[in-house]
Image: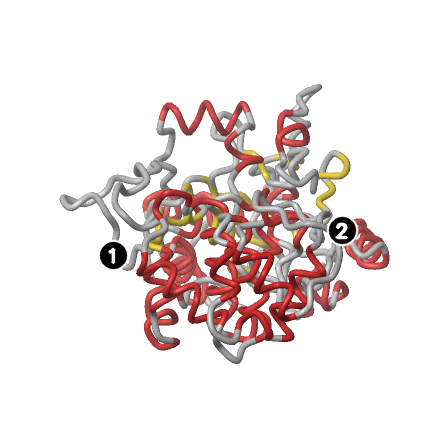
Amino acid sequence: MIGSAASGSAVGLADEIRIIGLGLGLTAVGFCDAEPMESTREVLIERREQGLNAEMAFTYRNPHRSTDPRATLPSARSIVVAALRYDTEMSQRPLGESPHARVARYATADHYRELRDALSVIKGHLKGLGHKAVVLADDNAIVDRAVAVKAGIGWFGKSANVLLPGMGSWFVLGSVLTSAELVPFAEVLPDGCGNCTECLDHCPTGAIVAPGVVDARRCLSWRLQAPGDFPVEFREALGNRIYGCDDCQEFCPPSRRADRRGIGARVRDAEGSFIGDTGSWVDVSWILAASDVELLERLGRWYVPQRDPRYIRRNALVVVGNTAGELVDEQLETLVGSYLDGDDDMLKRHAVWSVLALGRHSLLSLGTRASDPVIVGEVAALGTDWLGRGRLGAGSLGGEALGREVGDGV
């Protein structure tokens, strides 16, 4: 337990908690009541009915639970809400013979672990004083952005991110539900976006369909985490992203200013990194060649559907098609070719797209590929309407015709 065991008042205890939290490196600490968030529940249900959550479950799975803190801690009276600024320094893309994929800044290191560690200290302090307490961070039991706004830490931006005054949105959020009464509760901050629409204007897929409303069916961050095929219509927009998308934050003026000034940024160690870093860039050839065990050992912190590494490979194949260009060598052709010859139909379809996007049509005519029904079907499905750079002629191509046409470089 930290500090005095005898707090003179609820106000005094709140001050203790704030001092402890800030001392542990948290950027902001606020407090709100633990009453059900009825308006947030209505929004979740409405957007789910509209399909805006796509396949995403998380807090949409059970809106009654995720908007009622007492569903997790029945004796909850207050919520401690914390924000932790994560590092936003982007290293330069590595130079070399292999294409690299970009990782969103919030995922370059395990920022949630650091946040949970700090919240756990606060939890321990509260329990040491005889109160009940539960830590929630990146947890479907609470809509963390809603309680952050309720606690006066920030406001809902038009990107649907929470923005902290003067510091933008480069934060991870977490909470401690507690039976303690921590007052005074904060007032909700006024909107700080004004007439700005930068995030809406620059979303690469138009996923921000209205101020504060994101259609997950179009959001690259979600599409990278969703099961099934990556939608063809969004593959070019994916560019070099392998996990997450920062565009709405990078174009946000408050976030851009905070990023440029390094406000709240963490200090790197002597080697310039943090323990457990994934880093800002991942070698795509390594992803395509790595085993399941190797992928999950290095990238297992990412949300991967069903914990199945094939989805990481799926995304990597799209990145190859978008970025490899002149970096394609015999080794990379062999790696992509292994997916054309493999028995995973989903990865085979994405390998076809990658090959066509790179203009390497002849790879589809090697060996038995020209008569492979999955390859032939994918070429026919893509036709002339696909969004890649290496277009084929219109019409379905049978096995022999595919080999002939591709062999001629059509």
Badge 2: residue crowd in 10 Å (few <14, some 14–19, many ≥20): some
Residue type, label 1: Ile
Tell me the residue at 44%/44% (across/down): 323
Q: Residue at the far left: name it.
A: 270
**The N terminus is located in which quarter?**
bottom left
Front residue of this view, candidates 351 and 130: 351
Q: Residue 158, relative to residue 331: is it above or below?
A: above
Front residue of this view, candidates 380 and 28: 380
Indicate the position of residue 265 as horizontal and vertical percent values.
34, 36
Q: Residue at the far top: name it.
A: 195
Q: Secondary structure at mark 2?
A: helix
Q: Earlier in the sequence, mark 2 or mark 1?
A: 2
Tell me the residue at 54%/36% (across/down): 247
Q: Is residue 76 visible?
A: no
Q: Is residue 270 visible?
A: yes
Q: Which residue was labeled with disc 2?
A: 40
Q: Residue 176, relative to residue 240: is it above or below?
A: below
- Asked if residue 258 lies left or right of residue 169, the reply is left
Q: Residue 207, relative to residue 335: is it above or below?
A: above
Front residue of this view, candidates 307 and 115: 307
- Asked if residue 218 lies left or right of residue 369, the reply is right
Badge 1: residue crowd in 10 Å (few <14, some 14–19, many ≥20): few
Q: How many marks do you count on the picture?
A: 2
Front residue of this view, candidates 24 and 207: 207
Indicate the position of residue 27 as horizontal and vertical percent values.
42, 40
Residue type, label 2: Thr
Indicate the position of residue 213 as horizontal and vertical percent values.
74, 42
| Structural distance between the alpha carbons of marks 2 and 1 | 36 Å
Which one is closest to the eye, mark 2 or mark 1?
A: 1
Q: Secondary structure at mark 1?
A: loop
Indicate the position of residue 139 as horizontal and vertical percent values.
56, 63
Q: Which residue was labeled with disc 1?
A: 275
